[in-house]
Amino acid sequence: MRRILLIDDTPEIAELLTFALRDLGYEVSTSGFTTAVNDLIASQRPDAAVLDCTAYDMSESLFDAVRSYTAHAEFPLVIITDTPEEAEASLRARKAQKVLLVAKPFAASQVARALDQLLG
């Protein structure tokens, strides 16, 4: 079973997405927005993370934090965003690897497809 770390700053959405991803066969652990994202990845050892923050710059800061840690340079990330054009341009400027965007509104199946694509 694939382990996923879900970071979401809206508890109700985190709960719904957690249940949906579990129904799709993922083991999910959740956290609210945190700057200790690398500590969570190191301690929980997930296969990938899903970042769903209200403002894209919050997800962007988490992306930068993960990528700044050498051991997580290619850690698979799915970013859920309500500004996909802005997010895509930002990631392109960063030459981001192993990251996929899912535009809001979204279905859990879209997140699962992105995870499957990243994880192979």
Image (cartoon, rainbow, N blue to C red):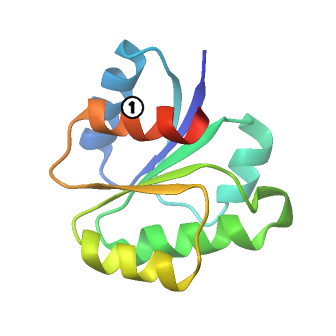
User: Can you name the residue that lies furthest to the bottom here?
Assistant: 93
Q: Secondary structure at mark 1?
A: helix
**Quadrant of residue 13 within the rendered picture:** top left
What x and y, as percent, mark residue 18? 38, 29
Q: Percent x, y for residue 101?
A: 38, 57
**With respect to residue 67, does 22 lie above or below?**
above
Q: Which residue is mark 1?
A: 112
Measuring 61% from the left and 63% from the top, which residue is drawn there? 97
Q: Is residue 13 left or right of residue 24?
A: left
Answer above or below: position of 48 versus 33: above
Residue positioned 61% across, 49% down in the render: 76
| Quadrant of res 82 | bottom left
Report the side of 42 relative to 48 (left or right): right
Q: Amino acid at mark 1?
A: Ala
Q: Of residues 43 and 3, which is closer to you in this image?
A: 3
> Which residue is depicted at the point 40% across and 78% down?
57
Residue, far left? 105
Point out the image quarter for the C terminus: top right
- Identify whether 5 is placed above or below 38: above
